[in-house]
Image (spheres, grey):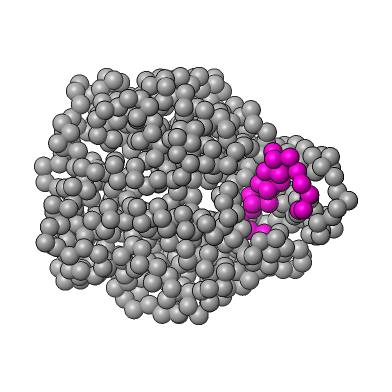
Amino acid sequence: MSRFRWCLLCLGLLLGSIEFGYSQSRSTRSEPSNSLTVAEARAFIEEAEAKLMGLSVNASRASWVQATYITEDTEILSAQANERAIAAGVDFAKRATQFDGLTLPANLARKMKLLKVSLTLAAPSDPKESQELTRLVSSMEATYGKGKYCPAGQDKCLTLEDLTRLMANSREPKQLLDGWVGWHDIAPPMRHDFTRYVELANKGARELGFADTGTMWRAKYDMPPDDLAKELDRLWNQVRPLYVSLHAYVRNRLREKYGDIVPAAGPIPAHLLGNMWAQSWENIYPLVAPTDADPGFDLTEILKKKRTDDRQMVRYGEQFFISLGFAPLPKTFWERSLFLKPRDREVMCHASAWDIDNVDDLRIKMCIDITAEDFNTIHHELGHNFYQRAYNRQPMLFRDSANDGFHEAVGDTIALSITPEYLVKLDLLDKPSDPSKDIGLLLKAALEKVAFLPFGLLIDQWRWKVFSGEIPPEKYNETWWQLRQKYQGVSSSVPRSEKDFDPGAKYHVAANVPYTRYFLAHILQFQFHRALARIAACQGPLNRCSIYESKEAGRRLSEMLSMGLSKPWPDALEAITGQRQMDATAILDYFAPLRKWLDEQNKGKPLGW
Ligand SMILES: [Zn+2]
């Protein structure tokens, strides 16, 4: 499932991999100056929007070519185009601070703020330190990217791809632990660089007026940075009882399978959950599946039997949006997208949705297989595309989702509407499967989405404290495991120490990519789904509601999408849900039948860790 999308304000994400620089003379932070006027601020924003628009389109074109025709040259061209766009973004962010203290009309003030909070890494103005920071992040990302585990006595080294497969499929605890330890051994060399990166990144953030980098990351959520942390804890506490119930059930089943290496009442060993980071557990579904939970149909088989081809797969997705009242995708989408893996050249197959000109040159890039999983992914990716087109009349700086959790949430919201009833309407299924068989489907979804929540939360809990200095370098690893145990209820089966640097074995930490958006997306998608299902007058259980063909749900969705980033996200949330607060009770509603079932299974067994 894709977690990539192209947009200007995401450019900061790429800072890790790409060299950048900015002009020292123009970017030194100025003290708030009373002599600057609103007219000058307006001219500055106009200049920024025009320049960033041009650079963003160029960078998108170069990245598209690079992703669909990988050669030495396209990689260089793409890196250069990105470098130019990023350098301009950093420059504008720094220059925006000149207008601090000047009272501006709301729209202008919002744009000024967006320029400043769009960065995920602020380079210090000292050119030497700026270069050092860039080098550190590139080097950590490269260490991660080249990471391999070479088992003693074997000639073959294992890449992360090999190890991912091993963690998903092996049921040999020794082999799993060996792969787990092998991968985590790539990270200790990053520890020193990471410590210095934290210092320098904080220095850059302070020059932009933030207390530290974590505060800068939290500043983009339209609330005081410290309130966001409290808000996330509130959401987590809403959903925690469901997680604890799932955790207890999975622990019991794993104990039946693996014996005493899984404690009856303590945390689950992190290497037994089907994923290197124990971040989602769907790969162990076969180990924990209920008996008698076969939904009675296999969408992959049905699609294959119907001789569905790649274009038809995408047409199904498009039809979903048309049924809600959205206009069909432009002709260029069908001409310019990449649907199939070419036979004669290298491409990046990872599914992604693109908005090349920030207007309507929409595309998806994926190597479509005729499977239920890709059917789902297509609905998700098109969610990005329809969002992108919906906000294309906003000014440049507002062409993005309401906060960074919204874009992913919208794609997933649409995918939640792929119900048996929807498949019947598409003529893919004769009659809906019996709801009594839903426990299997719900459990599988929970292993993916509920299991993810504590992980989605703790990565930045750890990093925010690292950036603020609350976690000093000599406690990096100890606190990492405290948080993993506290939130996820997982532990390491082998002793860990400060010689290790386990956070660095996760890409987003090594590459300076914030993570809170994934937690938010997982909360929001259920909140959106519940609200839209109600608008569509769906009476049944939430996991059986599809908003397909509901013009009213489409109208409300479109209303939110078209706002883009122009208003604080609570306004956007309200447009769909009528609520101004994020609310995790929708997940509880969605999984209510599963929760009941899990609680029955857990009767008399310990809960928690
Ligand atoms: Zn996505």
| Residue at the (81%, 56%) spot, across then down | 32
Tell me where residue 79 appears, x and y as whole percent. Answer: 65, 49
| Residue at the (52%, 36%) spot, across then down | 572
| Residue at the (22%, 48%) spot, across then down | 595
Please identify the quarter of the rendering in which residue 40 is found.
top right
Considering depth in this image, is 369 or 23 the residue closer to the camera?
A: 23
- State whether residue 147 appears in this view: no
- State whether residue 427 appears in this view: yes
Q: Classify 162 as above or below 43.
A: below
Left/right of residue 144 with respect to residue 1 in the rendered view: right
| Residue at the (24%, 43%) spot, across then down | 592
Q: Classify 190 as above or below 284.
A: below
Identify the residue at the far right of this view.
Answer: 35
Q: Classify 591 as above or below 245.
A: above
- Start-end of magenta stretch: 100-122
Tell me where residue 526 appears, x and y as whole percent. Answer: 37, 40
Left/right of residue 373 with respect to residue 73 in the rendered view: left
Tell me where residue 225 appears, x and y as whole percent. Answer: 57, 57
Considering depth in this image, is 50 or 307 the residue closer to the camera?
A: 50
Considering depth in this image, is 157 or 411 the residue closer to the camera?
A: 411
Tell me where residue 66 appears, x and y as whole percent. Answer: 59, 42
